[in-house]
Image (cartoon, rainbow, N blue to C red):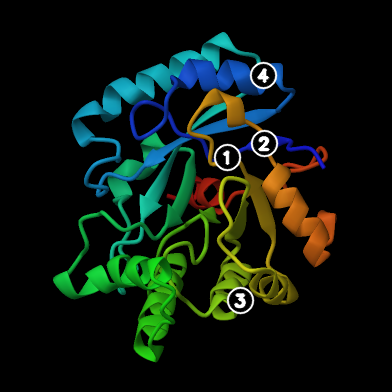
């Protein structure tokens, strides 16, 4: 299994160690056909791309795109900020970005104080091995579903990492709206049983490195091990072995 393109990488503008050009050159050297630079979203308190830096960041990604032979896409790993499904992007942001990722993170500016449960409660419970309450699973699932239904999200990143949801319901929603579920090669986020249940819904996948340094650009080892262990058909993964995905966000923007 070989990545055709890597759509989840970070740079020094969030919590990565390298520049957009260094990421892009590494992707080119490793034979990828495309790479996305996807910083943490604006609402991340410590590791997100700042609005004040966005213009300079975009210039650097666009310059990298000119200096390498493969497309370098501008993306963001937006935060799901509440049960309502609110994410970091506004409609005005759409024209400035190419790829729309979204996930649940802990240290962000939530829409409402009560929405803090999505990240903080999930993180604490996973840290101490405490199972989730039914209400936490219900509310986290609603947050994912509302985010996918209300926003043209391309990829849900690291589903259920440091949080709890009904992954089958989230996968069905992603299947119906044309949103990919990421299988992360950086960190385990679904058990084998959960991943099998997700696959049974018919949803399609992307494998991403979630690279925070150039050494991991294009890496798919951890994801591949789980995919083979669970028995997911490789033709359900749209960015490996020469295949390229069709992104919902790009299609949405054609009709803006």
CA distance for labels 4 and 1: 14 Å
Percent across and percent down for residue 9 are 51, 35
CA distance for labels 3 and 4: 34 Å
**Kind of element beneath mark 3:** helix
In front: mark 2 or mark 1?
Answer: 2
Mark 3 surroundings within 10 Å by alpha-carbon count, few (fewer than 14), some (14 through 19), many (20 or more): some
Answer with left or right where residue 171 lies relative to residue 11.
right
53 and 198: which is toward the camera = 198
Q: Are marks 3 and 2 in contact (CB under 8 Å)?
A: no
Task: Provide the residue designation for mark 1.
Answer: 7
Q: Are marks 4 and 2 in contact (CB under 8 Å)?
A: no
Answer with left or right where residue 150 lies relative to residue 66.
left
Residue lying at the far bottom in this picture: please name it: 134
**Kind of element beneath mark 2:** loop
**Kind of element beneath mark 1:** loop
Mark 2 surroundings within 10 Å by alpha-carbon count, few (fewer than 14), some (14 through 19), many (20 or more): many
* Residue at 83% across, 64% down: 231
Q: Earlier in the sequence, mark 3 or mark 1?
A: 1
CA distance for labels 3 and 1: 22 Å
**Kind of element beneath mark 4:** helix
Task: Provide the residue designation for mark 4.
Answer: 28
């Amino acid at each position: 299994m070989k990545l055709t393109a890597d759509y989840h990488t970070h740079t020094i503008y969030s919590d990565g160690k390298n520049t957009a050009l260094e990421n892009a050159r590494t992707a080119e050297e490793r034979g990828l056909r495309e790479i996305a630079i996807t910083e943490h979203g604006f609402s991340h308190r410590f590791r997100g791309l700042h609005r004040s830096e966005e213009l300079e960041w975009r210039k650097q990604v666009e310059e990298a795109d000119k200096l390498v032979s493969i497309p370098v896409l501008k993306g963001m790993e937006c935060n799901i900020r509440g049960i309502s499904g609110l994410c970091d992007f506004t409609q005005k942001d759409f024209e400035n970005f190419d790829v729309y990722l979204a996930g649940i993170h802990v240290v962000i500016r939530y829409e409402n104080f009560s929405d803090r449960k999505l990240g903080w409660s999930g993180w604490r419970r996973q840290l101490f091995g405490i199972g989730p309450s039914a209400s936490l699973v219900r509310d986290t699932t609603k947050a994912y579903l509302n985010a996918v239904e209300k926003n043209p999200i391309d990829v849900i990143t690291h589903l259920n990492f440091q949080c709890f949801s009904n992954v089958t319901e989230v996968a069905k929603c992603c299947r119906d709206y044309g949103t990919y579920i990421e299988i992360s090669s950086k960190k385990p986020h679904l058990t084998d049983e959960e991943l099998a249940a997700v696959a049974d819904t018919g949803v399609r996948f992307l494998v991403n490195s979630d690279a925070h340094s150039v050494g991991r650009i294009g890496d798919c080892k951890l994801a591949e091990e789980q995919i083979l262990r669970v028995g997911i058909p490789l033709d359900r993964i749209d960015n490996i072995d020469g295949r390229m995905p069709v992104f919902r966000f790009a299609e949405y923007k054609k009709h803006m």
